[in-house]
Every structure is written in structure tokens, then in C-alpha cells.
């Protein structure tokens, strides 16, 4: 990974560096397209094969059949395109967790505005304890928040701010027990390539991912898994030639599978790049094997913060994945003295990169398979020095 040669990197939850073999695969794909002719009869089988091979590779990753997988540009489009095609009615209610990304929240707000629907909040951001306690609390709160008007629940698989894992399968089971079974939309930006699916993608109605974060693929390519129920009831919203069952016929109907949510021309070399990145991850072992390696470093960081006199992790138990958020301990590193953003800048000047968050106000560091123990120690040392100076 060339991006790691001159820096210590903890921003995998924002964007993962592209491995050299993936970059080579992208370049080779561009060259192949030009050699065959970018719009020739010879290039079309190559394009179909490239897309089909990636779709098939994603089947075991997501745990859903290929007919339920559609390619998108990113997580937001993966959420929005199927969501806006569902049957909505005035006075329906959208129940959105208080830990969702602003992009998804904004889309839901506009959807509610257009259809005259209500919005409600499911509090989960304050759940910072052990996984078992978190699961019980999420289900208890969800059960209490659901009403006969609730038609959608929006909940991330791995919360982008606290790093807590949500019990998606159990949430789906609870929703299925309701008479008017609400739809379940899952933002999987932080879970795909980070934690095992454990049936989450299969249980959700919309499970939207991106390849450029924990999968270390190229930006500009995402994927969404949709349920059979959504395929039966949902309609495409932004329609192009890739949505059609016969792309050259203007009167053609849309695909009867998830491809109805694909629109038009995509950058084909990105498919080759993500294919390579997924292969590289698979070479490191199973999803559980990879998670164990990620947790080695995140637990190392969490423990260092837990014992620090200056910093404290948000989570009260070791993280379930590689995302570690933390803040200054009261009285030692108050937010009024040094802002999270200024700390990010100060660390960046030393070649150490993480990010700041606004809600809650904190810092976030992500550990991945390639994170080394000495890099975690370096981060802890730099944080200690900054706190001492402040």
C-alpha cells in the first residue's frame, strides 16, 4: 500500500488505502478496454464477465443470492435508490437511530417531506457497554418505539461514531413480528470488510455498502443487497439502460432482480480493482480470522486509552471491530482547551492520521489488518505528548 509508506494511518473508516495489486488491476483493465476498443463487439463480453465475476464474489461476502445484489456508486446511493421506490403513504413514520450518518438522515428527511410522513428517533448512541447489554437495550428500545405507523427503521450495522455493533438479525426478527412489518434499512459503510455479516445483509431489506473503506478498494463503487420483499414491492427510481431487461429496447421492462436499481454507465476498471482488493482480503483468512486480527490492534489501542490519564475511549468494553472513538478525560483535556479538529491537525503534522467527529465531539482511530503494534504505540505516545503540552 503506497499510501502507508510515509504515514501512520488510522482512517480506514473514511477511506482505505488502495493496495498496489488493485491499482495494477485497474490500470490493466483500462488498457484492456482500449485494446479491445471502448465500444466494440469485442469489449462487451469482457465488460459482462468483469461485472458478473465481482457480483458472484460478493455472494459469500454478503450471504445473499446474486439476484439480490446491485452495484451503486457509494453507500448513500445504495440506500436512497431502493428506498425512494418503496410504497409510502401520508402519516407513515420513519424511525431513524440517533447514530446515523447525516447523508442518510438528510435523504430520509426529504423523503418524509415529500410524502407527508413523520420522523422519530431511536436512541442508540449512548449504548457504550458490552455487546450483550447493548443488544438487549437496542431491542427493548426498538420494541417501545415501534407504532402502527412505523414503516421504516434505519439502523447502521456498525455505528460510525461509537464503533458499537448493532444486532441487525434480531432487529429484523422483531420487525417481522409486527403486523405492518416495517422496512429495515441498514447502512453498512463500516461493517462491510470489517465484521462478518452474520446474516445481517440477508435479514435487511436494504443493506448498502461501499468498497473504498474497510475493503480498501477504489472509491466510486458500492453495492447494495435488497430483500425479495423489496423486489416484489419496490420500483426503480432513477432509471437508465442498465435498469432494463433489454437495454436496447426503449419499451423494455425493468429487471426482475436487483439490477433494476442500477442506472447506466459505470467505470469498469473499478470493478477489477475491487475484485482484487476482496481477493487480497480473502487471502488473509476467513471473516472471523480477519476480525480477530483487527481486534488485536483495536483492543491494544482501547486498553492504552483506558489506562491513560488524559484520554478515555467512548466504549466501556473492548471494541467489537476496528473502530475506536475517544475523548479527553474531564479536567485534563477539556474540549474548551483543545478541539478534536486541532488535535487531528497536530497529529497530521507528525505523520499520524485519524479524524475528528462532531456528534459526539471526539476523535476516531481505525485499526485494520495492516496496522502494526508499534503504530498503535506511536499514536498513544503522540496523544500523551499533546495532552501534556496542553
Image (tube, rainbow, N blue to C red):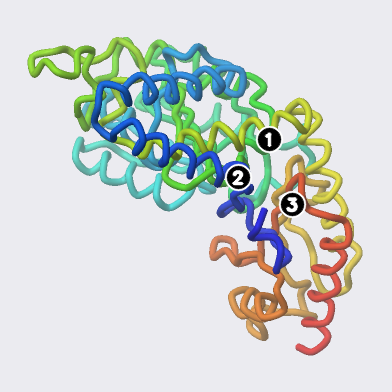
Q: Position of residue 273 (x, y in %)?
A: 52, 39
Residue 116: name its quadrant.
top left
Q: Secondary structure at mark 1?
A: helix
Which of pointers 1 and 3 indicates the residue nearer the eye? Answer: 1
Residue 279: name its quadrant.
top right
Q: Which residue is mark 2?
A: 216
> What distance separates the C-alpha of mark 1 from that of mark 2?
10 Å
Residue 173 visible here: no
Residue 360 visible here: yes
Give the position of the C terminus as an image quadrant: bottom right
Residue at the (20%, 25%) spot, across then down: 241
Query: Is 386 displayed left or right of 335 in the figure?
Result: right
Q: Secondary structure at mark 3?
A: loop
> What distance separates the C-alpha of mark 3 from that of mark 2?
13 Å
Q: Which residue is mark 3?
A: 367
Crowd around label 3: few <14 · some 14–19 · many ≥20 (10 Å)? many
> What distance separates the C-alpha of mark 1 from that of mark 3?
17 Å
Q: Nearer the viewer, residue 298 or 8?
A: 8
| Sequence-wise first label, 1 or 2 | 2
Residue found farthest to the front: 35
| Sequence-wise first label, 1 or 3 | 1
Query: Is 174 displayed left or right of 208 in the figure?
Result: right
Q: Nearer the viewer, residue 51 or 184?
A: 51
Q: Which mark is residue 280?
A: 1
Residue found farthest to the left: 251
Crowd around label 2: few <14 · some 14–19 · many ≥20 (10 Å)? many
| Sequence-wise first label, 3 or 2 | 2
Question: Given contact means CB atoms under 8 Å apart, are the residues at marks 1 and 2 in contact?
Answer: yes
Q: Nearer the viewer, residue 63 or 299?
A: 63
Q: Position of residue 155 (x, y in %)?
A: 52, 36
Above or below 379: residue 278: above
Amino acid at each position: 500500500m503506497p499510501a502507508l509508506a510515509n504515514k501512520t494511518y488510522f482512517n480506514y473508516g473514511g477511506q482505505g488505502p488502495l493496495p498496489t495489486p488493485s491499482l495494477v488491476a485497474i490500470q490493466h483493465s483500462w488498457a484492456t478496454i482500449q485494446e479491445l476498443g471502448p465500444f466494440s463487439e469485442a469489449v462487451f463480453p469482457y465488460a459482462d464477465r468483469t461485472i458478473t465475476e465481482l457480483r458472484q464474489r460478493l455472494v459469500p461476502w454478503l450471504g445473499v443470492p446474486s439476484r439480490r445484489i446491485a452495484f451503486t456508486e457509494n453507500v448513500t446511493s445504495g440506500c436512497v435508490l431502493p428506498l425512494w421506490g418503496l410504497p409510502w403513504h401520508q402519516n407513515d413514520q420513519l424511525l431513524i437511530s440517533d447514530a446515523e450518518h447525516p447523508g442518510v438522515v438528510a435523504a430520509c428527511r426529504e423523503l418524509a417531506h415529500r410524502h407527508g410522513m413523520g420522523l422519530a428517533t431511536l436512541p442508540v448512541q449512548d449504548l457504550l457497554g458490552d455487546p450483550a447489554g447493548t443488544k438487549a437495550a437496542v431491542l427493548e428500545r426498538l420494541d417501545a418505539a415501534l407504532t402502527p405507523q412505523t414503516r421504516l427503521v434505519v439502523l447502521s450495522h456498525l455505528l460510525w461514531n461509537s464503533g458499537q455493533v448493532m444486532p441487525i438479525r434480531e432487529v429484523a426478527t422483531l420487525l417481522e413480528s409486527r403486523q405492518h412489518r416495517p422496512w429495515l434499512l441498514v447502512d453498512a459503510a463500516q461493517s462491510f470488510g470489517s465484521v462478518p455479516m452474520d446474516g445481517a445483509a440477508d435479514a435487511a431489506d436494504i443493506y448498502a455498502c461501499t468498497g473504498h473503506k474497510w475493503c480498501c478498494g477504489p472509491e466510486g463503487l458500492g453495492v447494495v443487497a435488497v430483500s425479495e420483499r423489496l423486489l416484489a414491492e419496490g420500483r426503480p427510481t432513477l432509471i437508465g439502460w442498465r435498469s432494463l431487461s433489454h437495454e436496447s429496447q426503449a419499451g423494455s421492462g425493468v429487471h426482475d432482480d436487483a439490477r433494476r436499481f442500477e442506472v447506466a454507465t459505470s467505470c469498469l476498471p473499478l470493478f477489477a480493482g475491487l475484485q482484487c482488493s476482496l481477493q487480497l482480503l480473502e487471502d488473509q483468512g476467513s471473516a472471523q480470522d480477519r476480525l480477530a486480527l483487527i481486534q488485536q490492534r483495536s483492543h491494544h489501542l482501547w486498553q492504552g486509552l483506558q489506562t491513560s490519564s488524559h484520554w478515555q475511549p467512548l466504549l466501556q468494553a473492548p471494541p467489537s471491530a476496528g473502530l475506536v472513538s475517544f475523548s479527553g478525560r474531564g479536567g485534563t483535556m477539556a474540549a474548551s482547551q483543545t478541539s478534536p479538529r486541532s488535535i487531528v491537525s497536530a497529529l497530521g503534522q507528525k505523520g499520524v492520521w485519524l479524524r475528528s467527529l462532531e456528534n459526539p465531539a471526539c476523535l476516531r482511530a481505525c485499526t485494520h489488518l495492516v496496522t502494526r503494534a508499534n503504530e498503535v504505540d506511536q499514536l498513544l505516545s503522540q496523544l500523551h505528548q499533546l495532552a501534556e503540552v496542553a
